[in-house]
Amino acid sequence: MTRKAVIISRILFALYIIVLAFLCFGNFSSIQQAPKTILGIPSDKVVHFLMFLPFPILSYLSFDCFSRKSSKAVVAIIVTFLVGAIVAASTELGQGLTVYRSADSHDFLADLIGLGLGTVCIIISKLARKQR
């Protein structure tokens, strides 16, 4: 990746973290309720999944891991997932400390599924680039 692309990726990642924090800790009790389910899945779980899906992708791009050798890329992918899991767990614990939000292990599971799919996207992209 070019230096300019890395800088843009880092700016996007920083903005993403700010939006993620706002979505996790904002008080949204005054806005209109969303549908209870989306395709039979509780809508708040879909939101948690979508909030954490970009985390590994943006993190991986921000630290220019695509230019690394395969062995280092594997470590970077694992670390990216683990850091995302720590962020997800921290947000759930933090929500449990507020009076207007609650910690939910199912939300954490949705976060992990989003992180997992984002990580799979990185692996597929890495494999596709390697074959070129």
Image (cartoon, rainbow, N blue to C red):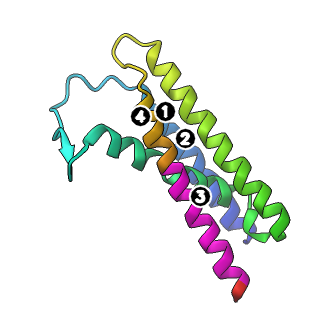
| Viewer-nearest of discs 1 and 4 | 4
Secondary structure under tag 3 reads: helix
Residue at the disc numbered 2 = 17
Q: Earlier in the sequence, mark 3 or mark 2?
A: 2
Earlier along the polypeptide chain: callout 2 or callout 4?
A: 2
Q: Amino acid at mark 4?
A: Asp
Residue 93, percent from left and from top = 52, 21
Residue at (44%, 29%) from the top-left corner? 105
Depth check, mark 3 against mark 2: the one in front is: 3
- Nearer mark to the viewer, of 1 and 3: 3
Q: CA distance from mark 3 to mark 2?
A: 17 Å
| Residue tagged 3 | 119
10 Å crowding of disc 3: few (<14), some (14-19), many (20+) = many
Which quadrant does the N terminus fall into? bottom right
Q: Position of residue 30 (x, y in %)?
A: 20, 23
Q: Quadrant of the C terminus?
A: bottom right
Amino acid carrying label 3: it is Thr
**Mark 4 highlights which residue?**
107
Which badge, 1 or 4, is on the more N-terminal residue? 1
Amino acid type at image mark 2: Ile
**Is 99 situated left or right of 86 in this image?**
left
